[in-house]
Image (cartoon, helix red, strand yellow):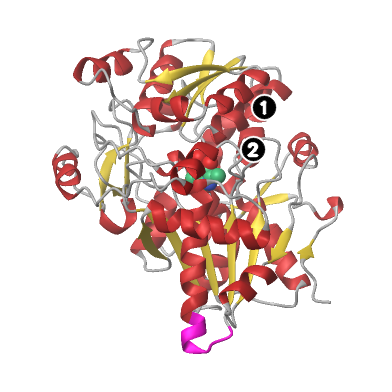
Amino acid sequence: MAQTKFVLDEKDLPSRWYNIQADLPAPLPPVIHPGTLQPIGPQDLAPLFPMEIIKQEVSQERWIDIPEPVRDVYRLWRPTPLYRAHRLEKALGTPARIYYKWEGVSPAGSHKPNTAVAQAYYNHQEGVRRITTETGAGQWGSALSFACQLFGIECKVYMVRVSYDQKPYRRLMMETWGGKVVASPSRETAAGRAVLAKDPQSPGSLGIAISEAVEEAAQREDTKYSLGSVLNHVLTHQTVIGLEAQRQLEMAGDRPDILVGCIGGGSNFGGFTFPFLADKLAGKRKDLRVIAVEPQACPSLTKGEYVYDFGDTGQMTPLVKMYTLGHSFIPAPIHAGGLRYHGMAPLVCALYDAKMIEAVAVHQNPTFEAALTFAKTEGFLPAPEAAHAIRAVIDEALRAKRDGKKRTILFNLSGHGHFDLGAYEAFLGGKLQDYEYPADKIAEALRGVPQVKA
Ligand SMILES: Cc1ncc(COP(=O)(O)O)c(C=O)c1O
């Protein structure tokens, strides 16, 4: 019998995170202050983040030790299993071997606790009692509520309005772990009130929710801010995924030809692919293809510009060089709430710019078709975000079939969709809408990007 599940022991839990900054072809462009246009320093970030996280953000060390209390929490669900998708392969009739790393087994149901636990720990170490954050799909807000609960920290979550309405049970999950949840845009911050003044029906976006959470943290002495994606330290924490997957694929006696992950802010994709990309950056695996999958409704990599922009809608964050659709762009209310972000992790952007990775954009109907094919064969019900990766995997597996090639495809199944059944209902009822690529809105938003010479 062919093996289905490749499982590591608790003692094989990685003891270090991999920091790809040490291996980039060129250092990342500096993060700059929007007023002075000079690179920012640690003190500029100190009101928002604990010092250990600021250090990790700029660290050039290849390996960063995972503190023992963090590993101890990881043991609740890590190492996560790697599966060979025998039934999916059979249904597609493909000669490709398909594997998936299953991050939906965490308490919150996705990869997000991998960094939430680390961030809550470092805040706790530095005496922080209160944290604000944003959440799109609700996965990140759940993960941070859970992590803050474990370390005795109060957690306030600005939840993007459209998700707040679509997913009441995600809110209840956060509240169960002690999180306090408000719909964003809200009347609690100047940034939220400004958006509501222009559009009282605003569906919200990650960019708006970030502004609200940052504003509150910047104004309150007792509060810091935590981001669930995009930043370097977040992607570094997520590398436990790829480090485990490397060992598991070795157990399977295989090596990947193609890696696939969905991208919202880039954290599950980065965490999963970076340990493998180290070989490609070192010139050892030039043929390895690494594919990032984004929604057509919010195509940051495939249709954005690589320029300096704000990380949020309210222009409260520093300027980062990234592929962006413009900080004022508000994506259509697709069900993959975690992929509705105008920008992208600077690390992912630098690798895309260096042609180390590829990107594709997909619509939500074909994405849900792929989710159903997966659920009907492998059983697990994917989150809409993760289903974007499955769409691209199925397309690559069918290409392998046409080419008659035995390729090994490995993807990250970043979370389950148990709180996304409203989206499945819309799809099954034929009511799911595909939103055309919003060229005009993006062009307008890009005109509002600050003019900074890179
Ligand atoms: C299950 C799942 N996958 C992917 C994402 C996208 O985020 P990131 O690109 O940071 O992994 C999210 C975000 O909420 C998510 O919930």
Give the image quarter of residue 230.
Answer: top left
Instruction: Write the residue at 47% across / 88% down.
Output: 403
75 or 107: nearer the viewer: 107
Badge 2 or badge 1: first in the primary sequence: 2
Q: Position of residue 423 (x, y in %)?
A: 47, 41
- Judge whether residue 229 can be spotted in this image: no
The residue indicated by pointer 1 is 146
Q: Is residue 334 left or right of residue 56?
A: left
Q: Disc 1 beta carbon < 8 A from ligand 1?
A: no
Residue type, numbered disc 2: Pro
- The amino acid at mark 1 is Phe
Q: CA distance from mark 2 to mark 1?
A: 8 Å
Q: Which quadrant would residue 340 be assigned to in this image?
A: top left
Camera sees residue 221: yes
Image quadrant holding the N terminus, namely: bottom right
Q: Is residue 374 above or below residue 151?
A: below
The residue depicted at 59 percent of the width and 85 percent of the height is: 406
The reply to whether callout 2 and callout 1 are in contact (CB within 8 Å) is yes
The disc at residue 123 is none
Q: Which residues are magenta?
A: 400-406
Say left or right for 110 vs 182.
right
> Is 148 situated left or right of 206 in this image?
right
Q: Residue at x 68, y 29 (%)?
A: 121
Direction bottom: furthest residue: 404
* Of residues 387 and 182, the one drawn nearer to the viewer in this rendering: 387
Residue sitting nearer the eye, 244 or 375: 375
Q: Position of residue 322 (x, y in %)?
A: 33, 48
| Depicted 157 relative to depicted 345: above or below | above
Left or right, 21 with respect to 153, comes to left
Residue located beneath label 2 in the image: 113
* Residue 95 point in image, percent of width and height: 59, 83
Mark 2: secondary structure: helix
